[in-house]
Amino acid sequence: MRVAVVVVTVVVLGAFLSLVAAGSAQAPPTVTVNVTESSLTVGATGALAAGPTRFEFVNADDGAPEIAIAALRPGVTLADASAALRSNPDSAIEMIHIDGGATFGGPRRAVTMNLRPSSTYVAVNLSGDNPQEWEITPFSTSDQSNGASAPQADARVRIFDLRFRGAKVLPRNGVVRFENAGWAPHFALAAPLRRGAKQRRVARALRRNAQGQLERLLNFERSMEVQSLITRGAVDYNELRFPKRGRYVMVCFFEGHNTQGMYRFVRVR
């Protein structure tokens, strides 16, 4: 009997401590980024503390802007990075850590990313084909930690080299954690399979990059970018709302990664 009482006491105490720990977890601070196709404003009045930070991207017009949040690598100046982004965006990837961003399919997107300490960041509006017209807005982080904890993830996807690992079921409305643990930049587009589309035919079309066949097999009008372009080491918590449940293929088209097998069939429930 005494042993049973001790066991019950330990279990109750453990549950209580877990509740206290959960209650003491600090939610990430939110930074609002207001966007149009020709403007970009980051709501940071001073240096941000490092750590998990929720970026809420607000689309102020009817366009579909694409935003990247990137930290300058050590020794890279803001002038150097800005010049590279405007003249040769491909070369700029070697100068920055792309920690997250958003491509809009609606008025708002929210992503939590882990900001690096003592860093200069740039928010870049990649809308339009002319890099000379891209809006580049800098902000910085201090050496202090914000003490926040990352949000709870409903599903986890790990990107390793040219493959997606982890969850095969994604929530229709929830938080999905993406981690780039590979050597190259990647993004993830989720496109629903059309009725009757066979996975083997989709896989063959993706490897061949057969655009016409892909349009017949996948509904790109209802697709969404579930993870923006990120470089190695980045971890993002994407707040997602899919247009419908069902069968999707998650694919990276960056630099033809789809032709090398970078796709994964998932269910959205």
Image (cartoon, rainbow, N blue to C red):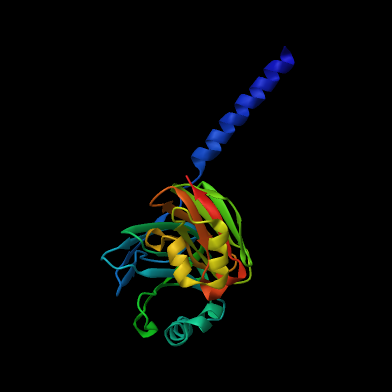
Q: Is residue 127 left or right of residue 199?
A: left
Name the foreground residue: 223 vs 229. Answer: 223
Residue at the (68%, 16%) spot, across then down: 5
Q: Is residue 36 left or right of residue 94?
A: left
Quadrant of the snapshot with the N terminus: top right
Question: In the picture shown, does residue 197 fall above or below 12?
Answer: below
Question: In the picture shown, does residue 232 fall above or below 1?
Answer: below
Residue at the far top: name it: 1
Question: In the picture shown, does residue 127 fall above or below 83?
Answer: above
| Image coords of residue 26 (percent x, y) | 48, 47
Q: Quadrant of residue 257 in the image?
A: bottom right
| Image coords of residue 48 (percent x, y) | 44, 63
Name the foreground residue: 258 vs 59. Answer: 258
The image shows a total of numbered marks equal to 0
Q: Quadrant of residue 15 in the image?
A: top right
Name the foreground residue: 37 vs 207. Answer: 207
Residue at the far left: name it: 61
- Does residue 228 appear in this view? yes
| Image coords of residue 134 (percent x, y) | 36, 79
- Does residue 150 appear in this view? no
Name the foreground residue: 258 vs 237. Answer: 258
Q: Quadrant of residue 162 in the image?
A: bottom right
| Image coords of residue 161 (percent x, y) | 64, 67
Residue at the (35%, 69%) spot, across then down: 65
